[in-house]
Amino acid sequence: MGSVLADRYELTRELAGGGMGTVFIADDTLLSRPVAVKILHPELARDPGIRERFHHEALAAARLSHPGIVATYDTGDSDGVAYIVMELADGGPCARSSTSDRCHPPDVAADIAAQVADALENAHRHGVIHRDVKPGNILVRSDGRVQVVDFGIAKATGAADLTRTGMVIGTARYLAPEQAKGNAIDPRADVYSLGLVLYEMLTGQVPFTRDTDMATAAARLTNYARPVRELRPEVSPALEAVVMRALAREPADRYQNAGAFASAIRDAASGRVEEPAKPRTAPRPTPQPPPAPAYQPPVRSSPRKRHTNPMAWLLVVIALAGAAVAIAWAVQEASSNDPATTTTIPLNGP
C-alpha cells in the first residue's frame, strides 16, 4: 500500500475490517518489526470527542500486561487519521469461517472461553472493561493460545456503535442487555458477551438475531436464548448450565466476575459439576417463639427425723395433769362462794 503513519508505520496490507476501524499489517521502521495498526473509521475520527476517548482508552489498554491480551504499543494522529499500534498476533478469529462448520468441539470451545475469561479478569482488575467481546476480537493462535484485542475501543466510540448505519456488523449481536438499554455497565457486561461467544462456538448460531442491529440488540431485553442442548445435545448439562447462567438478563444473576466464570467453565468441562448459585443475600432466620419455661418441681426438704426423749414426754404429761387439777379446783371453789349457783330445782315438783 505504501502509506506511512507518523513517519514510522508503513502499511503493507489490510488484515481485517470492523464497525469501528480497519486493521492493517505494517512495518515499524523505527524498531524493524511487524505490527498491527488499527485506524479509526473517518466518520468516527471526525468527532473530536471520539478521537480523544480513542487515544485515552488506548493508553489504558497499553498498561495491561497479560499473555491473553494483545499488547498495545502506540497511539496517535497522523494528518487526521487516528490510529493504535498493537502487537501482531498470528491467530485468527475464534469463530469458524465456514457456515457449515461453525461449531467447536465442546472441550475446545470451553478452553477458548476460559482463556478469554482469564484475560478479561486481568483487565477488570486494572479498571478496564472491554465492552466489545466478540469473535472478531478473540484471536486463536496456532498453538491454541488465545489473545484478546481492542480493549476500550467500544468505550471510546460511546453509543455510536448503535446509532450509525452500517457501523456495527457483528457487534450488536454480542451486547449485554444493559448496554442495549444504554445503562451504566461493569465487568458483568463482558461476562454476558463472552457467554454469547461461547454459545455460538457450541451451537453454531447466535441467539436474538433479527433483521437490523437495533432489533437484534433489543431482542435480548424480552427474549431468552434457547437452551444449548436443544441445538447441540452432546454438550454436557453442566456446561449448558454455565452458559445459560452467563446469559442471565439481570447482571446480579450472572457470574459476578470473569474469574468465577473461567473457573465454572473449567469445572464443567472437566466433569466437575458446578455448585448451585448462592443466594444474593443471606436468608433471614424464621422468627421462633420464645421457649416455654421448663417445669421445675418444687424442691422439698427432706423430713427431719424427730428424736423422741422419754423424759420430755413424762414432763409434758405431768404438766398437763397438774393443769387439769388446778382448773378443776378453781371451778369447784368458785361454785361454793357464788349464791347464784346454789338454787336447787326440784326434779319431781313441790
Image: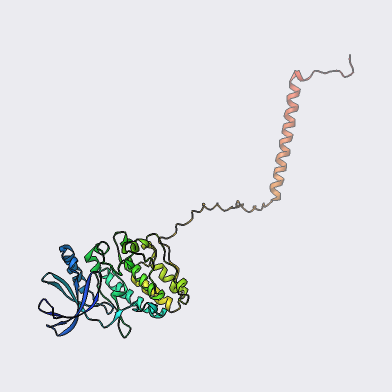
Task: Name the colour scheme.
Answer: rainbow
Picture coordinates of residue 295, whole percent (x, y) = 59, 52
Picture coordinates of residue 294, whole percent (x, y) = 57, 53
| Left or right position of 202 against 163 | right
| Left or right position of 21 against 291 | left
Residue nearer the viewer, 252 or 21: 21
Residue nearer the viewer, 323 or 89: 89
Q: Is residue 302 above or below residue 330?
A: below
Q: Residue at x 34, y 77 (%)?
A: 95
Q: Is residue 297 above or below residue 75?
A: above
In which quarter of the view is residue 163 placed? bottom left
Residue nearer the viewer, 341 or 54: 54
Picture coordinates of residue 213, whole percent (x, y) = 31, 64
Q: Indicate the quadrant containing the C terminus: top left, top right, bottom left or bottom right.
A: top right
In which quarter of the view is residue 129 placed? bottom left
Picture coordinates of residue 186, whole percent (x, y) = 30, 64
In which quarter of the view is residue 112 placed? bottom left
Q: Is residue 247 above or below residue 296?
A: below
Residue nearer the viewer, 133 or 171: 171
Q: Indicate the quadrant containing the N terminus: top left, top right, bottom left or bottom right.
A: bottom left
Outermost residue on the front side: it is 211
Q: Residue at x 37, y 79 (%)?
A: 111
| Left or right position of 350 against 134 | right
Count of marks, rendered view:
0
